[in-house]
Amino acid sequence: MQAPKPARLVVLISGSGSNLQALLDACADPAYGAQVVAVGADRDGVVGLDRAKSANVPTFVHRVKDHTERADWDAALTASVASYQPDLVISAGFLKLVGEQFLAAFGDRYINTHNALLPGFPGIHGPRDALEYGVKVAGATLFFVDGGVDTGPIIAQVVVPVLDDDTEDTLTERIKDVERRQLVDSVGRLVREGWTITGRKVTIP
């Protein structure tokens, strides 16, 4: 019996690519069931692109400022991702909101990770906002991306206790550790077991 082909992952980044590296490391084990087939970025010269090249993974860059209209950037990004025929597209620190064309192509298989327990504290300052609100637990959320800001159907969540002496930096770092593990574990489950999205409910068999 022939072993199933690994699922094809396209990972989108904007910076250092620490989540990308965790996925690359996981994919080195054939039992994980996935392979990173391309890495895309919205800027040149970021460390994450170097990580991809070191792993012999193809890369592409689409900068918003190189396009007259945001929709043109979205179309170019969509075309590049589609050319690699991904089973899952993963936003791993990708700091751009994709548009209608991208979501039409990949909305049911485009996932993102956020450093707060959604629906609380969406946006780019999740840990800071959580601390200012005085919550006793923070955490990370993995979700399918929709047209809103951090509003898509939730795949998984993990809780991080807030300590009395936490700063934004210390809380952020502790969240990053569990966020990375959650991303790797959940992607593995998704590609090996499949998933269904019914309304807002995500089910992994």
Image (spheres, grey):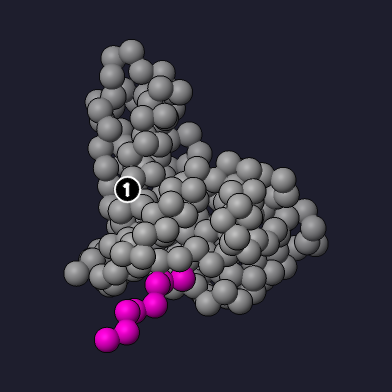
Q: Residue at coordinates 41% horizontally, 18% vertically from top-left? A: 167
Q: What is the magenta range?
A: 1-8
Quick check: 109 above or below 165?
below
Going 41% across and 59% down the picture, which residue do you hit? 27
Residue at the (49%, 73%) spot, across then down: 86
For badge 1, the amino acid type reads Gln
Left or right? Give the position of 76 relative to 188.
Answer: right
Q: In front: 5, or 157?
A: 5
Total marks shown come to 1
Residue, far left: 205
Q: In this picture, is 126 found above or below 13? A: above
Residue shown at 39%/54% (left/top)? 26
Instruction: Report x, y in % for residue 2.
Output: 32, 84
Side of 159 where 49 appears, left or right: right
Q: Is residue 166 left or right of residue 137?
A: right
| Image quadrant where one finds the C terminus | bottom left
Label the magenta part by its dominant secondary structure.
loop
Residue 73, horizontal then vertical, whole percent:
70, 64
Q: Residues within 10 Å of mark 1 (few under 14, many from 20)?
A: some
Q: Residue 33 location, x and y as percent?
A: 35, 67
User: Is-magenta flag for residue 99?
Assistant: no
**Which residue is under mark 1?**
182
